Image (tube, rainbow, N blue to C red):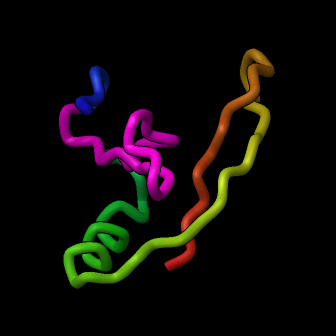
Amino acid sequence: MANSYDRDAVGIWLGGHPETPIGWLYRKDGNRDTVLQKLDAGGEVTGHIEQRIRRQGGKPQKVVVFWL
């Protein structure tokens, strides 16, 4: 599945549910290189989903938090 905003974004899926990504790892994300290196080395990345409030507009935003 491609991301229309960033063609180099990496989709994050919930194991066993490949139909819709729960988030994206973008080029601008500070942990992108670390996450990709761990996956390339055969490791797994675990995490959880948090819901935070944006500072502008107050619209809820889901954030994927990773543990490396």
Residue 5 to residue 11: above or below: above
Residue 48 to residue 24: above or below: below
Instruction: From the top left corner, tell me how far across and down residue 12 is, in percent.
Output: 41, 50
Instruction: From the top left corner, tell me how far across and down residue 64 is, in percent.
Output: 58, 52
Please state, as top left, top right, bottom left or bottom right, where the N terminus lies in the image.
Answer: top left
Say whether residue 65 is left or right of residue 21: right
Residue 9 part of the magenta-drawn span = yes
What residue is at 47 percent from the left and 58 percent from the top? 15
Magenta region's main secondary structure?
Answer: loop
What residue is at 75 percent from the left and 20 percent from the top? 59
Q: Which residues are magenta?
A: 7-25
What residue is at 35 percent from the left and 73 percent from the top? 34
Instruction: From the top left corner, tell me how far across and down residue 26 is, in percent.
Output: 35, 45
- Using the rendered view, name the quadrant where residue 47 is placed: bottom right
- Using the rendered view, name the quadrant where residue 63 is placed: top right
Foreground residue, 45 or 6?
45
Which residue ends up furthest to the top in the rendered image?
Answer: 57
Say whether residue 32 is left or right of residue 53: left
What residue is at 28 percent from the left and 67 percent from the top? 36
Residue 55 part of the magenta-drawn span = no
Instruction: From the top left corner, tell me how far across and down residue 8 is, in percent.
Output: 20, 41
